[in-house]
């Protein structure tokens, strides 16, 4: 009886440890609007990003040089969308609206930007796909932080 109990305890412990290791290797659970774990959506978003966004935001999401400064026309330069930029500091809904209506329309108060809205160019699903692609490129720790921002915004 004692041997069976010890074997059972070891078996349960092994299962718990295996589950913990498996959970650590899983990507962060999706939180928010962007389906960054969906390969099909991410591929669609990448193609759209290359066609419509990369000319300003960079082929590698690096943004324009000196993006923290104003450009020659007095408007904000295109920021990076990789982990070095501030994109991930904003919840999905706000990012979606920036792409849909444009930064100036969202910020208001005379703010000017070259980031026009894409509502007449992209469907909502396409905008979400582009953002899913962008988020899919971030390191896990940034995704987790962004998910926390989304969770806080949803409350």
Image (cartoon, rainbow, N blue to C red):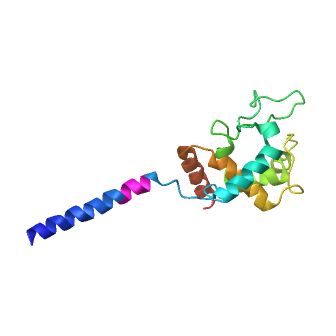
Q: Position of residue 132 (x, y in %)?
A: 68, 53
Question: Farthest residue toward the bottom?
Answer: 1
* Horizontal and vertical percent position of residue 101: 84, 53
x and y percent of residue 79 in the render?
74, 37
Q: Quadrant of residue 112?
A: top right
Q: Relative to residue 36, is residue 73 drawn left or right?
A: right
Q: Is residue 40 above or below residue 135?
A: below
| 21 part of magenta stretch | yes
Q: Quick check: 147 left or right of 118?
A: left
Q: Where does residue 107 sit, x and y in percent of width and height?
A: 81, 47
Q: Nearer the viewer, residue 154 or 142?
A: 142
Note whether residue 15 is visible: yes
Report the quarter where the N terminus lies.
Answer: bottom left
Q: Which quadrant does the C terminus fall into?
A: bottom right
Looking at the image, can residue 94 be seen?
no
Q: Nearer the viewer, residue 122 or 4?
A: 4
Query: Is 93 contained in the magenta span?
Result: no
Q: Main secondary structure of the magenta part?
A: helix
Q: Residue at x 73, y 52 (%)?
A: 45
Residue shown at the point (80%, 34%) measured from the top left: 77
Identified at 66% across, 52% down, the residue is: 91
Query: What count of labels does the image hold?
Result: 0
In the image, which residues are magenta?
A: 19-24
Residue sticking out furthest to the left: 2
């Amino acid at each position: 009886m004692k041997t069976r109990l010890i074997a059972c305890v070891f078996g349960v412990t092994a299962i718990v440890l295996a589950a913990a290791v498996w959970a650590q290797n899983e990507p962060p659970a999706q939180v928010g609007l962007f389906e960054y774990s969906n390969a099909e959506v991410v591929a669609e978003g990448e193609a759209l990003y290359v066609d419509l966004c990369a000319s300003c935001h960079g082929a590698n999401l690096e943004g324009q040089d000196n993006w923290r400064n104003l450009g020659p026309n007095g408007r904000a330069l295109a920021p990076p969308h990789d982990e070095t930029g501030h994109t991930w500091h904003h919840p999905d809904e706000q990012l979606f609206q920036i792409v849909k209506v444009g930064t100036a329309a969202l910020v208001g108060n005379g703010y000017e930007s070259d980031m026009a809205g894409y509502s007449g160019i992209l469907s909502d699903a396409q905008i979400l796909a582009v953002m899913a692609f962008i988020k899919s490129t971030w390191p896990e720790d940034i995704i987790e932080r962004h998910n926390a921002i989304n969770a806080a915004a949803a409350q």
